[in-house]
Amino acid sequence: MRLEIDGMAVYFPYGSIYPEQVEYMLELKRSLDARGHALLEMPTGTGKTAALLSLIVSYSLAHPEQRLKLLYCTRTVHEMEKTLAELRLLLDHLPQPACSSLLALGLSSRKNLCVNSDVLSARSRDSVDAACRSLTATWVRTLAQDNPNVPTCPFFEAYDRAASTGAEAVLLPAGVYTLGDLRTFGREKGWCPYFLARQMIRYANVVVYSYQYLLDPKVASFISKEMQKECVVVFDEAHNIDNVCIEALSVSIRKQTLEGAARNLTQMSQQIDRLKATDAGRLRAEYNRLVQGLAQRGNLAITDAWLGNPALPDDILKEAVPGNIRRAEHFLSVLRRLVQYLKGRLMTENVETENPVSFCSSINSQAGIDQKMLKFCYDRLHSLMLTLEITDTDEFMHIQTVCDFATLVSTYARGFSIIIEPYDERMPTIPDPVLQLSCHDASLAIKPVFDRFQSVIITSGTLSPIDLYPRLLSFNPVISRSFTMSLTRDCICPMVLTRGSDQLPVSTKFDMRSDPGVVRNYGRLLLEMVAAVPDGIVCFFVSYSYMDGIVNSWNEMGILQDVMQHKLVFIETQDVVETTLALDNYRKACDCGRGAVFFSVARGKVAEGIDFDRHYGRLVIMFGVPFQYTLSRILLARLEYLRETFQIKEGDFLTFDALRQAAQCVGRVIRSKADYGMMIFADKRYSRHDKRSKLPGWILSHLHDAHLNLSTDMALHIAREFLRRMAQPYDKTGSGGKKTLLSEEDVMKMSEGGLDM
């Protein structure tokens, strides 16, 4: 359908539209008009992706002079594929010539795009990257020209031959390409899909890729460096964006890392000795280049570019490498001293916290390595690995981690802490020393994105309280808005359960969680619900250890056996393969009518990316409030930084973080307006206004006062009544009262102010 939004033609891929989608598009257009950033919370299941894509693509068609490009960032490959499928639907509704000229594609790692079976046989992503480099590095290909027995990649060779005749020769035809489409196209042409996609993101109108390609300097420096300012960047499902930013600039070093780094240094030393005997000119050429002030070679071939500098672009030193690390053997000697120093620091028996300035000072006084040498560790290592023609980069990840740490710790004085822990607080009897360079300031990683691009849109179904994000990310959105959900029937039924049928309060507070009465009441709640609620039930626990403990207790009490009389039970584990298998079988059990219960964990893989729509999730129970482990040294250091720098109180941040995770968990159950489901917040703390008020507005608007302080038997009664109501036929358009599904004419009336919303 073709709509008029604020005087602009918008092409929408469906025959009708929700009122909140129209409002969402209107706010989005205003932020694009203002060339500013926006923060938009849209309820789950209301077509956020379709609204985003339709408005931004239509806006670029209406303003061809701006040459807008859309960079759409998702968290997972699954979300990327869903976005591209939505875009393909939109493409069919665009007018000519836009329909036949738009190019959109997804970009992911080699592991997801490679079509060479020899490379794909490697198990991990790093191993696939290394296997690819071993076939495509320039020195390998040069050797292969003289010796046909040296293996190369036929797909890359064919792509490179075609590209050598001119960039136009390897262009993708217009259209929308998922990762599967790129692989198919690559096989048909005999070209490498990964390098083809890397080449094509320059020309594409829409690029869908991972957050890391913009937020992690190590990847962004060579994937996204050529993106022009006229880009609209969308971070979808961005409720955890502050954590992604922090992880991008944090480094952990363990004993195994340092042992691996020591092995790497020995291997490199042996290779330098070999090179001195066979091709000393290569080491001399590198030295001369460094004397001239060139830390890196000129334009590296696309196959030779490895991970980029871990520091942000504006913080990288633009000067010559210090003289005392120009010679390869001198540089290795410095790294050996650094590794030895870090080994000594890991041998502590007490927890130590230090800021970067004093840590660098300590390295200088004890290991004789000054701050400038540390800053150049990454660049000097990268240069040396190219000189030594190392292709098995996965083998050298340990020394890479140490150099990343050195470069970051010497570059940033504020917003970071070095925390050394001899063991995990939760298992004090097991020595497991770890040295962590922990970033506390999420605004550091995202600042280059805000500064560089015209508009950045941060959106999700769970951004409440929305006013905290501009403070955490240090930016000023021109639009900040939270939308509600228009429904023809109350298909969401949130409840707060504060006590069991025996009137004993329930909570996962540390002093209560092991109480047999709480454990029994939680078990009775689940047992009552599996008997009354059809199809799928999803349960979320605050941590893996709590889930293990309570499931064991239920087993000993006989509750688990009683639950299994009604439904099969499946459990999420920390193993991805096991969890995927459990999910598949859970869906099968729901499909065949047997019904099932899925036990999962807040902040786990399932809570973040799996939908339990329709009969796969008629009820979700959130057992407890998913606070972070509050004795974590890293968390305590971050809370102190937030308090001192942004004036965000510890309690406010912890509550905000716990409630966004809880909302993310329960939001899995509603994925469209035709769907229905119940949400039980099983903890007495949810009845407090300061906790509850931080839930998204679209959940709060359905949380009635009568449902704020329930016992198990009351919740059961409400659940039965709700299911009985949902079984009745209903009018999907809402023509009886307020309209919840609009036609083109309705949108026109709405814009003229003649339709009651």
Image (tube, rainbow, N blue to C red):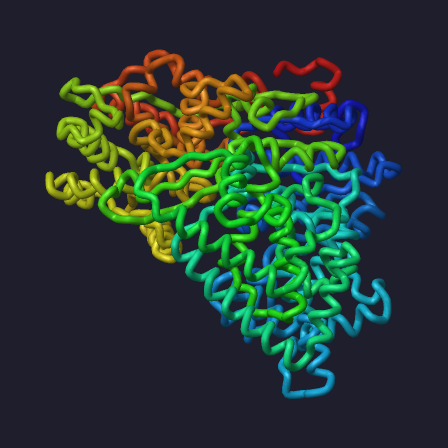
> Quick one: which residue is furthest to the left in this view?
557
Residue 547 position in % (x across, y down)? 26, 40
Q: Residue at x 39, y 29 (%)?
A: 726
> Quick one: which residue is furthest to the right in this view?
65
Q: Quadrant of the N terminus?
A: top right
Q: Is residue 124 above or below residue 418?
A: below
Q: Residue at x 15, y 31 (%)?
A: 520
Q: Is residue 506 above or below residue 431?
A: above
Locate residue 552 relative to residue 203 in the image: left or right: left
Residue 730 shows in the view: yes
Of residue 612 and residue 235, the one placed in the foreground of this image is: 235
User: What number of labels is visible?
Assistant: 0
Q: For residue 627, which quarter of the picture? A: top left
Q: Quadrant of the C terminus?
A: top right
Q: Residue at x 17, y 22 (%)?
A: 501
Residue 756 position in % (x across, y down)? 63, 14
Q: For residue 314, which quarter of the picture? A: top right
Locate residue 90 relative to residue 717 in the image: left or right: right
Q: For residue 703, which quarter of the picture? A: top left
Residue 50 position in % (x across, y down)? 64, 38
Residue 192 position in % (x across, y down)? 68, 68
Residue 746 shows in the view: no
Locate residue 52 relative to residue 508 in the image: left or right: right
Q: Is residue 117 above or below residue 227?
A: below
Of residue 121 and residue 327, the one placed in the foreground of this image is: 327
Of residue 499 and residue 383, the one placed in the foreground of this image is: 383
